[in-house]
Image (tube, rainbow, N blue to C red):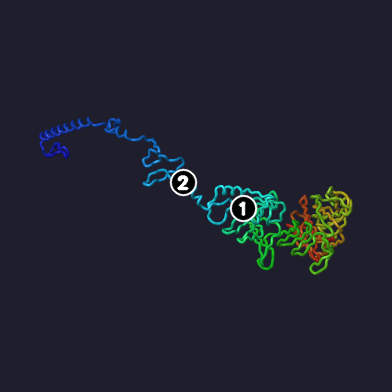
Amino acid sequence: MATTPNRNYPLPVASNPVRDDVARLIAAFEAIDGDVAGLLAALATKAAAEHGHSLADIAGLVDALNGKASVGHTHSLANLSDVSITGAPVGRPLTIQPGGKVGIGPDWAATIAAALSAGDVQDDRNDVSSGAKLVRVDGALAAALATHGNYYSTGSNRNIDTVAAGDAGLYYDGNPGTWPLAPAGRFWWVTTQRVYTGDAVVQRAFLYASSAPDLSQFEYIRIRSNTGGMSSWRRVFHEDQNGNILFSGTVSLSGLTPVINFQDTDNGVTGQIGSGTTDFNVASNKPLDLRPEGIRAGYISATQWLFYTSEQLRARLHDGGMEITGAVDATGYMLNGKEISLEDLNPTFELTLLDSADSGSTQVSLHTWTGLDIGGPDAGRQVLIAVGSSTSASGVGNKVVAVTIGGIAAKRVDDSEASIARSCVGLFLATVPTGTTADVSVQFNYACAGTGIILMRLDGTLSEINPQSVAYSTDGAVHTSRSHTGLQGTKNAVLISAYIHNSTGDHTWSGDVTEEAQHTNSGGTSTLSVATSRFPAFTSDAEATCTTPDNVWSSLTSTVLR
């Protein structure tokens, strides 16, 4: 018969007549009804899923908690079962007793006192002989205080040669003993320290700052051997706060090959005094400035040697030869195997640039400028004037006819130009004793523009004028450069060259002259420049070349003054 698997409720059967299955279903419902009724009765006796209990509702809980201590409870030492302190004196330590309990410890103060009494104790603060000793507390304190503050005045009569190891103090050098420097009323801070074992000591001394400020940064040192002999004092080199090595007096290097190497870590400058061989030399990658007693006497670089007396440059030696640049106490010299005089070497005059001006683009034959600077007045003052001009007209001989300065006619000191030229240039000299400014007039034989002048002052005695040839542009000819070669000068004469071209743009000088002055016309029509150079002694062949930035009419003139 068919039933449910758990509670065996009767189930209908497909082959049964309906009347039979109805009876089976009725029986099944009745059985289910009985089971549900029983389940509901059982649930009625159960507690809710979320519910609480009071302490009293839990059997035995209150009695169990009453037998426990509070969370924040404390114990006194005497209440501990494994500690016994009954009768313990004040200050007595506690120790572990036999059996592991804690109890009253021994009297350590009495024990330590007995040990100290039986040991080898320091006699006093100066008792620092070899061997292990117990140090007196009072002696150690006294020693620490005394050795950092002892003061021995001149009446102390304390000999620094015989003081014991451990001594330190401020000594007046009137006390006996050997001092680093001869006694001179100074104070020294002196310390004496034992060296390992035995009686050997090392002694150090510093000068007290207030008694010798210049020497107070130096340390001196000496050693006393086990046999009692004291070495000489030696000064110790050391750095100051800026990293400089300090020393005073004489520094001596001994040995076959003494060498001092030095290096500047900031910029890599290196140098050496001594070569490491038997030959002594000075090597450095920077120029050497020689200053005995703080006064410059020489200066040596890779290209020249300069010689000074009383801080004044007197001579220069370079690959171009030897130059005497100032008066010296002598009447003659030997140069390249030849006897020469100061007159041969020293210039008899100097040139100084004064002023410059131009005419702009105005086409006139007479050009005048007012109030030009000519320097301070002097009875022998001479003014050198370079004049240059150009014209666009062809077939004319453009040249300077006359030049005046301050109403004084100037003398031409170069060769006259040829008569056919679009540009002209000239050098003129006048003695102008009065005034600090002057009017300058230049007369040409033809109206021209682009006229410029450059004024230079000549100081000294002029004994020779040697005009050179003129290179000029003929009608229609243009050039980017002009040269003078084979220029003749004697001994220390001065070569002066002037160049004009009818366009703007900087001139470039080469050869034996260097550019000294240049003036570009404000009208943008021409440029005038002057260059000078001194002939070295015995030189009689020089060159002057001036190059322009474009291909133009131009003229070049040169003269030699001495």
Q: Nearer the viewer, residue 12 or 346?
A: 346
Residue 73 lies left or right of residue 137; in this view the side is left
Place of residue 416 in the rendered image (x, y in percent of width and height, measured from the top left):
85, 60
Question: How many numbered circles are shown?
Answer: 2
The kind of residue on which mark 1 rests is Asp
Q: Can residue 451 be seen?
A: no
Residue 108, disc:
2
Q: Residues within 10 Å of mark 2 (few under 14, many from 20)?
A: few
The kind of residue on which mark 2 rests is Trp
Q: Residue tagged by mark 1? A: 167
Work out how far the residue at label 2 is from the one at label 1, CA to CA, in angstroms.
35 Å
Screen quadrant of the N terminus: top left
Q: Secondary structure at mark 1?
A: loop
Labels 2 & 1 near each other (Cβ < 8 A): no
Q: Earlier in the sequence, mark 2 or mark 1?
A: 2
Residue 499 lies left or right of residue 29; in this view the side is right
Residue 338 lies left or right of residue 198; in this view the side is right
**In this rendering, which labeled residue sits more in front, label 2 or label 1?**
2
Q: Nearer the viewer, residue 60 or 169?
A: 169
Q: Residues within 10 Å of mark 1 (few under 14, many from 20)?
A: some
Quarter where residue 276 is shown: bottom right
Q: Secondary structure at mark 2?
A: helix
Q: Can residue 281 be seen?
A: yes
Screen quadrant of the C terminus: bottom right
Q: Nearer the viewer, residue 263 or 533?
A: 263
Above or below for 99 versus 445: above
Q: Residue at x 48, y 46 (%)?
A: 110
Place of residue 173 in the rendered image (x, y in percent of width and height, measured from the top left):
69, 53
Place of residue 17 in the rendered image (x, y in percent of width and height, measured from the top left):
10, 36
Above or below for 92 versus 43: below
